[in-house]
Amino acid sequence: MNFQQLRSIREAARRGYNLTEVANVLFTSQPGVSRQIRELEEELGVEIFERNGKRLTGLTSPGKGILPIIDRLLLEAENLKQASEEFSGETKGTLTVATTHTQARYVLPEVVQSFRSAFPEVRVALQQSSPEHIAEWVLSGKADIGIATEGMSRFDDLISFPCYRWNHMVVVPDGHPLLQVKMIGLEHLAAYPLITYDVGFTGRSHIDEAFDNAGLTTDIVLTAMDSDVIQKYVSLGLGVGIVAAMAVEHGREKGLRAIDATHLFAENVTRLAVRRGAYLRSYIHDFILRFAPDLRLADIEAATSAQV
């Protein structure tokens, strides 16, 4: 039994039993992956995967029981590596943070700056994507930390912590009729084309829920992941924008005006997630506490040390 065999099993399950994808991820060949899987099955005396000819189609009953054990073995192997570097006094390393554009652009810069001052030999890698991919990267070990507003609490193998709360704001061009409304309502917004975030990004679910609950139909003419992109198209007159407040507070597109919308949409909570059972280097703890100073180190350690 070796780690390459274990990784082949794990990635086959993760990649929908597509051995070509598994081979690409593990930097090997498809026949090599097939051999690793078959050798481990022969050693264990059970078939882990169901097959249709040579093609893998699913997990057998023994495979469903074995896969979580393989996950734990690989996680503990990585934990052993991280712990040895920690205890040997090694201060170098890479902190990989998977997050959305909004967090990376508007919230993280000051945190990363202060972290780099404290840990100059630790490289920070920011990976930007959708909440779904962020969770996948943390679960797979490709990222140490995931930060997003949507989706972080839906995965059993992730521990997520609430970090801060924020609201949406409405942005319109100078001279827009909405600027004459004393207190805008959802019905006022629904009368105009809207520009906001893609589904699953930056509190979009709360925007949709507000209009649905009010029984209002919206004309969302353009969506984007990026707050800057949304504001740019609002400035071109394509519609009324609904963006995260921090995007407006940190500087908005020239010619735009902001309108308070805290009374229209539910408050959002940005969460930070790590993999359950993962060993976190001291500099990772430090980064977490810089990002979310209201968290307690003892609570982080207790949550992450729980068994997978």
Image: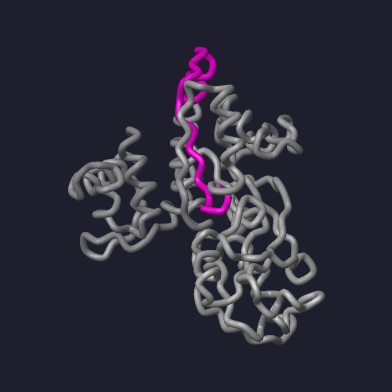
Q: Which residues are magenta?
A: 80-103
Q: Residue at x 65, y 38 (%)?
A: 291
In the depicted structure, whether residue 56 falls above or below residue 118: below
62 or 57: nearer the viewer = 57
The image position of residue 7, as x and y in percent, is 35, 41
Left or right: 101, with 268 as reference point = left
Left or right: 269, with 34 as reference point = right
Q: Residue at x 69, y 39 (%)?
A: 292
Q: Quadrant of residue 171?
A: bottom right
229 or 154: nearer the viewer = 229
In the depicted structure, whether residue 222 falls above or below residue 156: below
Image quadrant holding the C terminus, namely top right
In the depicted structure, whether residue 289 falls above or below residue 188: above
Left or right: 260, with 18 as reference point = right
In the depicted structure, whether residue 190 falls above or below residue 225: below
The image position of residue 92, as x and y in percent, is 46, 21
